[in-house]
Image (cartoon, rainbow, N blue to C red):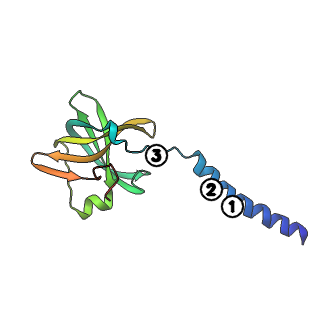
Amino acid sequence: MKTLQILVLVAISLAILYPAQAAQNAPAVPKYDKSTEAAFKGVVQEVRDRQCPMSGGLGSHLVMRLSDGKVIEVHLSSTRFVHQYEVVFRPGDTLEITGVKVNFEGVETIFARKIKRGTDEFLFRDNDGKPIW
């Protein structure tokens, strides 16, 4: 009986400690730093939805060729938010993105706050950079 109690305690300890250790080893999600905000111009190469820790699930992303020729991924918001407001971007769209460039998941990327396409403007974060989705 005492052995069973010890096994149960060990199992409970592992169940508590393993998720805490996994969370501790997870890469940190960069914060939106308003002081580094800039404007980026470019052309959409690809539109994709994928699992994303920044969006907390399925997130909408653009792959853009910036005006300097560099190709970079742009994080928009949760896919649900984009679909709810019927925001549609297509390859070939010329955009101006206001956001911050960060190193995320080992690559340079842009967290978008605002996107302009012609006279249309799409907001994904408030003026302080907090997600509105």
The label on residue 15 is: 1
Badge 2 density bin: few <14, some 14–19, many ≥20, Cα 10 Å: few
The label on residue 19 is: 2
Q: CA distance from mark 3 to mark 2?
A: 18 Å
Q: How many numbered discs sit on the rendered protein?
A: 3
- Look at discs 3 and 2 and give the one toward the viewer: 3
The label on residue 29 is: 3
Which percent across, then down, holds residue 103?
A: 41, 36
Query: Residue type at mark 2?
Result: Pro
Residue at horizontal 28 percent and vertical 53 percent from the top: 126
Q: Is residue 87 above or below residue 113?
A: below
Residue at horizontal 20 percent and vertical 50 percent from the top: 89
Badge 3 density bin: few <14, some 14–19, many ≥20, Cα 10 Å: few
Residue at horizontal 42 percent and vertical 56 percent from the top: 56
Q: Nearer the viewer, residue 47 or 53?
A: 53
Q: Nearer the viewer, residue 17 or 52?
A: 17
Query: Residue type at mark 3?
Result: Val
